[in-house]
Image: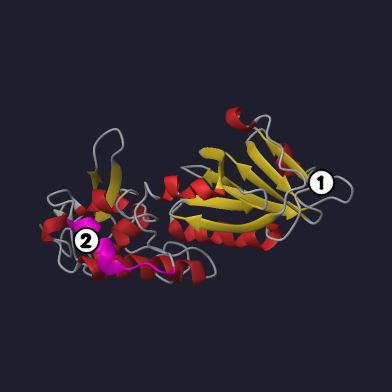
């Protein structure tokens, strides 16, 4: 599932091509939005919160999408006189198409899509934890929410978007490796929770600022992670084979990669 770094990239690209522009073509292939037409409305902002992309409109509404596992927003130039007629906007996987005179934004295989009043956004964000990538993120304050999870495993807790938003399996594993903490260690036994959250934030923002997404700062093939996706391959720090465990409760449990030497019981 795309994580905070990918969502920031997506939101920045959509903000670049949509904000300040009038929507000249709109199509939704989504049950609750089948009759919705945003044509004529102006996009006022595009930003990400956690794993949600929020498109604010001058009508007082916000279009919200969530990529889940397979979703993606693609952008292509509009064809003169044929707004929204790009080839990718006609594919059956296109769930949302927003076009202006210059650009077409196409949401493929979105996992969630709805339209809500902008004044009601708090109902969404209020159910989520603080966005680890937000400008005003306070690691000390967020650590209090983490600490309240007590004996719950830290890996599962970092993935819980109601505790802290924006961290997925990659940056959970990479930040815990940096902190030398096993994913199943109880939160109550993890030292310096604000530091751990700051490390996750640092890794995510480094990825956003890199040419391509990366948890290490390196972009070469096979160099973008230290433990994630490296089961049975040597740890880059000590050469012990990397292991993987499941964290969280089935059927929502997720893989967590770790080094048994660098991250002991």
Residue 8 picture location, percent across and down: 51, 61
Q: Secondary structure at mark 2?
A: helix
Between 96 and 37, the one nearer to me in the picture: 37
264 vs 83, left or right, is left
The chosen color scheme is secondary structure
105 vs 140, left or right, is right
Which stretch is magenta? 135-147
The answer to whether 92 is drawn above or below residue 54 in the figure is above
Residue 246 picture location, percent across and down: 24, 43
- The disc placed on residue 144 is 2
Q: Answer few, some or many: residues within 10 Å of disc 2's Cα (few below 14, many 20 plus, some between 14 and 19).
A: few
Q: Secondary structure at mark 1?
A: loop
> Which label sits in the foreground, 1 or 2?
2
Between 176 and 233, the one nearer to me in the picture: 176
Residue 136 picture location, percent across and down: 40, 69
Q: Earlier in the sequence, mark 1 or mark 2?
A: 1
Between 255 and 75, the one nearer to me in the picture: 75
Residue 114 picture location, percent across and down: 56, 38
The quadrant holding residue 26 is top right
259 vs 28, left or right, is left
Between 89 and 180, the one nearer to me in the picture: 89
Residue at 44% across, 46% down: 124
- The disc placed on residue 150 is none
Tell me if residue 236 can be seen.
no
Tell me if residue 2 can be seen.
yes
Circle 1 residue? 83
| Mark-to-mark CA distance, 1 and 2 | 49 Å
Q: Answer few, some or many: residues within 10 Å of disc 1's Cα (few below 14, many 20 plus, some between 14 and 19).
A: many
The quadrant holding residue 189 is bottom left
The answer to whether 221 is drawn above or below residue 96 in the figure is below
Chief secondary structure of the magenta portion: helix
């Amino acid at each position: 599932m795309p994580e905070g770094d990918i969502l920031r990239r997506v939101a920045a690209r959509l903000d670049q091509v949509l904000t300040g522009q009038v929507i000249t073509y709109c199509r939704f292939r989504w049950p609750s939005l089948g009759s919705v037409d945003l044509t004529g409305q102006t996009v006022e902002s595009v930003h990400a919160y956690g794993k949600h992309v929020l498109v604010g409109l001058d009508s007082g509404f916000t279009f919200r999408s969530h990529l889940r596992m397979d979703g993606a927003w693609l952008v292509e130039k509009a064809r003169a006189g044929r707004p929204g007629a790009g080839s990718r906007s006609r594919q059956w996987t296109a769930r949302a198409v927003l076009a202006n005179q210059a650009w077409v934004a196409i949401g493929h295989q979105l996992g969630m899509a709805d339209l809500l009043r902008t004044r009601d956004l708090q109902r969404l964000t209020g159910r989520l934890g603080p966005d680890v990538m937000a400008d005003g993120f306070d690691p000390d304050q967020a650590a209090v929410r983490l600490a309240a999870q007590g004996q719950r495993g830290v890996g599962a807790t970092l993935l819980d978007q109601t505790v802290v938003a924006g961290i997925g399996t990659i940056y959970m594993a990479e930040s815990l490796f940096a902190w030398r903490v096993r994913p199943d260690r109880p939160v109550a036994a993890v030292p310096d929770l604000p530091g751990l959250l700051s490390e996750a934030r640092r890794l995510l923002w480094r990825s956003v600022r890199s040419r391509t997404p990366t948890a290490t700062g390196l972009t070469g093939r096979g160099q973008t992670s230290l433990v994630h996706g490296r089961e049975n391959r040597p740890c880059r720090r000590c050469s012990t084979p990397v292991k993987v465990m499941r964290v969280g409760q089935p059927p929502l449990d997720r893989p967590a990669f770790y080094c048994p030497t660098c991250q002991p019981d």
